[in-house]
Image (cartoon, helix red, strand yellow):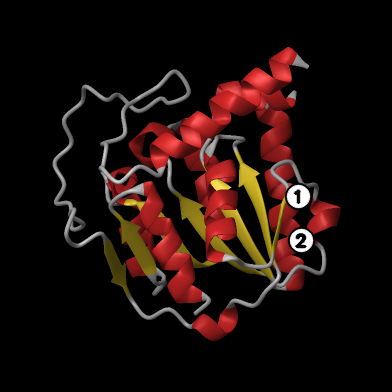
Amino acid sequence: MKKIALALIVLALVCTGLFADDYTSSKGTNDSEFDPNKTVEFVQETTSKNRIVTKGTVDKSLYSQPIFITSFGQSTEGAMLETVMKRCKLNYTYSPTATADKISGVKTLVIAVGASTKGLGAAGISIDDELARAKAIMDVVKKENITVICVHIGGSARRGQISDVLTDMVLEESSYLVLKEDANFDYKFTKYASEHNLPVSLIYGTKDCIDVFKSLYN
């Protein structure tokens, strides 16, 4: 019980930190294959005064409630996204390890992408199992034509081989992308959105995701 309580306290502190007012650039972690010491030139469009930049037109009629939220990669961003839904007072179900049968019949699926070896370990899930679960869910999405929002709010620290494989699975069926802009250091997301005529909202900090979803479900 003490271990569980400690884990909940740590998660709460992480959520509080990521929703702080000041922007903090994401840094590489042990869960990431992205090298924080490698300089990558890209023009950041969001700023502390212009915190959300949306490219393309978002068709709000596509996104009905209740919303189903799951995680691909078992990073803490899934819990962050649940906090967003609570603050927006939206009707949702959050199940980070949901199996494909739980997705059947869902109208709007929001997927928090970003792999964490620590998160996977805590959930008792191997990388292969997580990839298989993700594939099974996306198969249901394709079969039932479920509306998907791809959310990547972990920044550059959640970029890496496994994270990108999971992201690519989601991108193929997404109708809207929401991401913390420093994850777009190689223009992966905006390039895909442009090529497939998808709207994308770039956010300056994690907390800006709240305003994105408030606007979406206004």
What's the residue type where badge 2 is placed? Val
Q: Residues within 10 Å of mark 1 (few under 14, many from 20)?
A: some
Q: Nearer the viewer, residue 107 or 14?
A: 14
Residue 78 quadrant: top right
**What is the C-alpha distance between the residues marked 2 and 1?**
7 Å
Query: Which residue is tagged 2?
Result: 140
The residue at 48%/75% (across/down) is 216
The residue at 64%/77% (across/down) is 64
- Vertical relation: 5 (above or below) 20: above
Q: Residue furthest right?
A: 101
- Vertical relation: 20 (above or below) 60: above
Q: Is residue 77 left or right of residue 98?
A: left
The reply to whether residue 64 is visible in this rendering is yes
Q: Residues within 10 Å of mark 2 (few under 14, many from 20)?
A: some
Counting from the top left corner in percent of width and height, residue 54 is at: 31, 69
The reply to whether residue 172 is visible in this rendering is no
Residue 154 quadrant: top left
Which numbered disc covers residue 164?
none
Q: Nearer the viewer, residue 47 or 31?
A: 47
Q: Is residue 101 left or right of residue 151?
A: right
Is there CB contact under 8 Å for labels 2 and 1? yes
Counting from the top left corner in percent of width and height, residue 28 is at: 34, 25
Q: Secondary structure at mark 2?
A: helix
The residue at 56%/50% (across/down) is 83
What's the residue type where badge 1 is placed? Ala
Q: Is residue 15 left or right of residue 155?
A: right
Query: Which residue is tagged 1?
Result: 136
- Quarter of the picture containing the N terminus is top right
